[in-house]
Image (spheres, rainbow, N blue to C red):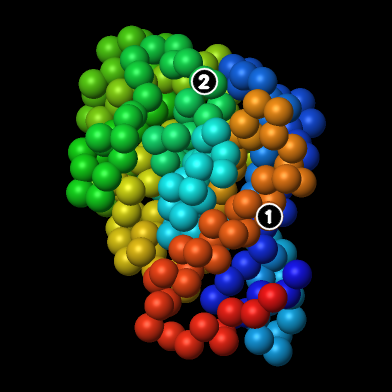
Amino acid sequence: LGIGVNAAMFRVVDLLFLRAPAGVQDASRVTRVYVRRAVGRLGTFTGRTTTFPTFEDLRRSGTFEWTATTRSDSMSLGRGAEALPVAVTAVSHDYFPLLGLRPALGRFFGDDEDVVGGERVAVLSHGFWLRHFAGDSAAIGRAIPLGKGTYTVIGVGPDGFAGIDLGATDLWLSIRASAGEIVPAEALTSRGWIWSEIIARLKPGQRAEDAAPLATRAYRLGAMEADSGRKLRELRV
């Protein structure tokens, strides 16, 4: 299936995990969403990164039971000579319920905090909490200097869970509230800024091969609506 510059096809891999991290529930239904793009004469490319509006298109479409987006990066914890590099993952608020996670301490952030301009909050990984806060429950509510701003610790992840990628995550942030730190704020609305990844939880009984064309259709409708002022011939099948 070849689609023009402003569209893409999705392929949902069968399994995200060979061995699910601690705390993930019913991991066989958790998947990555890959995007295959036909970009003019450059050819066809398949990858995990896509645009933030693409994630929002899929989430609104109801294709999956849960849809979340993530972006991993490095930030500095502390100021000046005492600053330390830490691995952070900015996620949408759907990330934690999608994986079925429960906090070991405190709470995860909700949709009311996952907003542009919202209060900057952080969830610590369990290992990071033990290493840098000595497992002290007083870490909850503590303000920490992170990157260019200050974040309030609201929770600690489950023991043994350090993210879904090979590299361990130290802290999770709201992907919308941290806009301007991880990526420029305009990346949240641009369909030309490819920077975030999508994970999804299949609905009960849903097969990955059936979900992929539904995801493709949701993207095409979203892209057509956003580009309604352009000629439709830019999209081709």
**Identity of the residue drawn at 35% across and 19% down:** 107
Of 199 and 147, nearer the camera is: 199
Q: Give the residue number, with chain letter if any, for mark 1.
A: 213
From the top left corner, tell me how far across and down residue 90 is, in percent.
Answer: 43, 44
State left or right for residue 72 relative to residue 77. Answer: right
Numbered disc 2: secondary structure? loop
State left or right for residue 202 relative to residue 196. Answer: right
Indicate whether 77 appears above or below 215: above
Numbered disc 1: secondary structure? helix
From the top left corner, tell me how far across and down residue 191 is, in percent.
Answer: 45, 69
Q: Where on the picture, by quarter, is residue 94?
A: top left
Of 205 and 82, nearer the camera is: 205
Indicate whether 58 appears above or below 42: above
From the top left corner, tell me how far across and down residue 109 is, in percent.
Answer: 33, 29
From the top left corner, tell me how far across and down residue 59 is, in percent.
Answer: 47, 46
State the CA–CA distance, disc 2 to disc 1. 28 Å
Q: Dot 1, crowdedness within 10 Å: few (<14), some or many (≥20)?
A: some
Q: Where on the picture, by quarter, is residue 185?
A: bottom left
Q: Give the residue number, with chain letter if any, for mark 2.
A: 101
**Identity of the residue drawn at 40% across and 78% down:** 228
**Identity of the residue drawn at 39% across and 54% down:** 182
Q: Dot 2, crowdedness within 10 Å: few (<14), some or many (≥20)?
A: some
Residue 182 shows in this picture: yes
